[in-house]
Amino acid sequence: MIAPFALLLLCIALMPLFAAHFWEHHYPKVAIGLGLVTAAYYVFVQKDWHPLHHAAHEYVSFMALVGSLFVISGGINIRVKGEATPMVNTVFLLIGAVLANVIGTTGASMLMIRPWIKMNRYRITGFHIVFFIFIVSNVGGSLTPIGDPPLFLGFLRGVPFWWVLGHCWQAWAMAVGLLLAIFYAMDAHNFRRAPKEVRELETAHEDWFFRGLLNVVWLALVLGAVFLPKNLQETTVLGVFSIPALVMFAAAAASYFTTKPEVHEANDFNFGPVKEVGFLFIGIFLTMIPALQILQSGEAVKIDTPLQYYFSTGALSAFLDNAPTYLSFLAAAMGHEHLSVDSTSDVLGFTTAHAAHLTAISLGAVFFGAGSYIGNGPNFMVKAIADKSKVHAPSFIGYMARFSIPILLPVLIVVGWIMVK
């Protein structure tokens, strides 16, 4: 029964590369079909509805956060006039790394990629797009459960909201700092290639315009829903829709209908990306049920040290979706201690007794999501926007051969060796 889960992850990783046309039109059927295979097993063979009910509740909570942040960030438009110096670019990426923890890596990426392209329009190259993916779309979002889907899954399972910040901020600061330093050196070299007169003329004036700022109110409502009292968080409608999820859905609807159409048009806003995430995660949440149950036995994964979990989680997160990878290794680590990832009290106990292991899994899942275009959802979205804007983004192989292996991987090895080991 692990086969549907493995097959779905392989499809997510490989179909966009080798059968893009088929995948674009049929991925909902594949994801839901594989999910129904697992659901049928639990209904007709195991005769146990509990795992399916738990998965449905978790899926709705997950999509409420991801979907609401996507819709609300799509209602905020940033326009830039003028060109950016290397220092301005570096500060912009740092702001993106912080913002990713407030509106998610997907929200921050969609909000900031177009201004990023415009503010560098006369000299933008592939490395600008790649470092944006490294920092804003991935590594930056490792401080809160809102930042990246893997961490939110941990939050839903019982990891305290501020636990991630308390245990990951030093590794975050080191990884972001190293990547920003490398970017600044490369961007300064790129900047000096233009004649001095052109540089001075293009960077003389820079103006910023913001539209759709009413959405900050809806964003605050979503963030407030995460911190509702525990009794409200545990209250559900129809056994699936939690109160925080309903608040998030309401905020997303309010944002969509109060945002002016011209703002959505300026952002090229559409529901395509969140629709894809929604369909794929129906399949993921269902098919991973038996995989998690087997991993909880503690016999499926033979690794022990935090550094081993860091690199093992990272290796898979670079090519498979990092959310189920995180949950799989968390289940394995907890199973090794005879604990269940389905038990909130067990998860809470694990965060205290084995904080180093959970930190390693969290960092590996988020950091290594930048290893390829398919490691994290925002990566391909950013590439698609760059291609549409006539910016030369590297190919799948070029991304890895020129950037993620020679630049990102050494940085993550150093961070892992110092902060995790």
Image: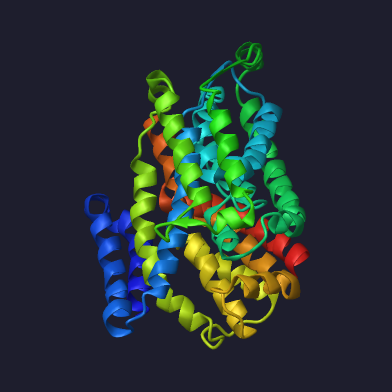
> For this view, does 18 lie left or right of residue 184?
left
The answer to whether 161 is drawn above or below residue 315 in the figure is above
Instruction: Locate the N terminus and report the quarter of the image it occupies.
Output: bottom left
Residue at (29%, 79%) from the top-left corner? 41
Query: Residue 268 in the image: x percent, y percent?
Result: 38, 29
Q: Quadrant of residue 348?
A: bottom right
Mark yes or no: residue 136 visible.
no
The answer to whether 401 is drawn above or below residue 261 in the figure is below
Name the foreground residue: 79 vs 417. Answer: 79
Q: Quadrant of residue 358?
A: bottom right
Query: Residue 137 in the image: x percent, y percent?
Result: 55, 45
Q: How many marks?
A: 0
Instruction: Locate the C terminus and report the quarter of the image it occupies.
Output: bottom right
Q: Quadrant of residue 42?
A: bottom left
The answer to whether 165 is drawn above or below residue 219 in the figure is below
> For this view, does 127 lie left or right of residue 239?
right
Query: Residue 32 in the image: x percent, y percent?
Result: 28, 62
Residue at (67%, 46%) from the top-left corner? 179
Residue at (42%, 22%) from the top-left corner? 266
The answer to whether 349 is drawn above or below residue 397 in the figure is below
Query: Residue 25 in the image: x percent, y percent?
Result: 22, 50
